[in-house]
Amino acid sequence: MRVQAITVALFGLVAIWFGARVFLTRSMVRSALSLLGAMAALGGLFLALEAEFLGVLQLMMMGTEMAIMALFMVMFMMDPGGLGQMEMTHQKRSARGAGLVAALAAGGLALRVGWGVTTPPVVDPATQTRLLGLEIMGQSMLIFETAGVTILTAMIAATAVAIARRR
C-alpha cells in the first residue's frame, strides 16, 4: 500500500511538472511533447491505481494524438521550434493568481477531507475487464461487429478502387 501511494504521488508530481512545462516553453513542439509527458504520467497514475484499462487506454490514445499533433505543428507552424520571439502565455498575472488560488483550494480540500478506511479488495483485473466488456457490449455486440466488418469492407473496396489497373 505504501509503495502504491508513493508511486501515485510521484506520477502526480510528474504530471503537474509536465503540465506546467506546457505553458512555460516558447516552442510549440516542446509544448506538445510536454503535454505528451503529462498524459503519459496520467497513464502511469491510472496504472498505479490499478485501473489497467484506463491506464493503457490513456497511454495509447494520448501518445498517438500528441505525436500526430507535434508532426502537424512541425509541418504547418511558422516557427515550431520557438526560435523567434513568440510568446505562448497571455494574462500572466491573472493566470498566476488563478493557478495559485486553485492549487491552495485543491490542497486545502485534500487535507480537510476525511479519507476514511481503505476499501476492501475487489475482484482481479481480468474479471473487471471481462465484466466491463460484458456491460458495454451486452446489448450492442451485433451492431459493433457489423460496423467493424462494414468498415473493413469499405477500406478494402477503397483500396481496390484507388489502385490503378495494369494490363
Image (tube, rainbow, N blue to C red):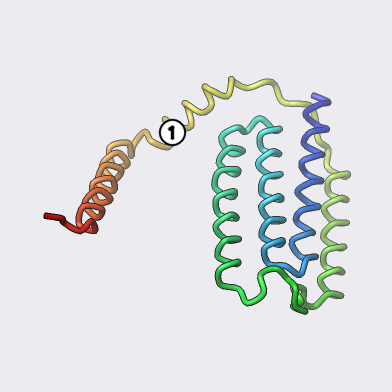
Q: Quadrant of the C terminus?
A: bottom left
Residue beneath the point at 55% across and 65% down: 72
Q: Is residue 123 above or below residue 72?
A: above
Q: Quadrant of residue 10?
A: top right
Q: Nearer the viewer, residue 129 or 67?
A: 67
Identify the amino acid type marked 1: Glu
Q: Nearer the viewer, residue 116 or 103?
A: 103
Q: Quadrant of residue 97?
A: bottom right
Looking at the image, the residue that sits furthest to the front is 167
Residue 30, x across and y down, in percent: 71, 61
Q: Is residue 36 above or below residue 142?
A: below
Q: Is residue 100 above or below residue 145?
A: below
Residue 22, x across and y down, in percent: 74, 61
Residue beneath the point at 81% across and 71% down: 95
In this image, 156 relative to 131: left or right? left
Q: How many marks?
A: 1
In what element is the residue under mark 1? helix
Q: Nearer the viewer, residue 125 or 44?
A: 44
Q: Is residue 95 above or below residue 69?
A: below
Residue beneath the point at 30% across and 43% down: 148
Q: Which residue is mark 1?
A: 135
In this image, 68 relative to 83: left or right? left
Residue 79, x across and y down, in percent: 67, 74
Q: Nearer the viewer, residue 157 or 124?
A: 157
Q: Quadrant of the N terminus?
A: top right
Mark 1: few/some/many CA within 10 Å (<14, 14-19, 20+): few
Residue beneath the point at 47% across and 27% down: 131
Residue 140, x across and y down, in percent: 33, 39
Q: Quadrant of residue 70?
A: bottom right
